[in-house]
Image: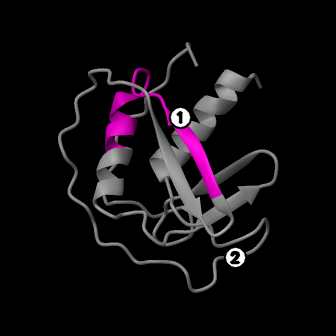
Amino acid sequence: MNWKRLALCAMLGITVLGTTACGTKSGEQPQGNTVKAETVAMPNFTNAPIADEYAIFDTNYGQFKVRLLGSKAPITVKNFDYLVKKGFYNGVTFHRVIEGFMIQGGDPDGTGAGGPGYTIPDEFSNDL
């Protein structure tokens, strides 16, 4: 898998599922850090491209920075920004960690099956 595709997978995985707190290591189950979030109303996002930006994630393992490609996935980035501003990801854990490959998080249930109560359309680009 080339770096651009890996970056897309990471960006989409983190953006769609997002998170700001890391509570488990590979193979561990979340323990008590999971926050039950209320359903968030879905705003009306347009697919007009926006500027790329960066998100800084603060975890109990340190910080990391992720580039959000608003020029390629504007609805996904707008949705991520919206949920961050609503506090949706506060206290949420990474529910899946594969060392050296990927992380998934942003589910308030800590299972990978939860979300804000709505879905957004998938955004794919051959440019990534």
Tag 2: amino acid: Gln
Q: Could you give the CA–CA distance between mark 2 and mark 1, rounded to whole angstroms?
A: 27 Å
| Quadrant the C terminus occupies | top right
State the residue at coordinates (49%, 24%).
124
Whether residue 7 is situated above or below residue 128 in the rendered picture: below
Tag 1: amino acid: Arg
Q: Say which residue label 2 marks.
A: 29
Q: Is residue 77 covered in magenta?
A: yes
> Magenta segment, which residues?
63-79
**Could you tell which of marks 2 and 1 lies nearer the N-terminus?**
2
Q: Which one is in front, 80 or 39?
A: 80
Q: Secondary structure at mark 2?
A: loop
| Quadrant the N terminus occupies | top right
State the residue at coordinates (31%, 60%).
117
Whether residue 20 is situated above or below residue 50 in the rendered picture: below
State the residue at coordinates (46%, 28%).
69
State the residue at coordinates (64%, 31%).
7
Q: Say which residue label 1 marks.
A: 67
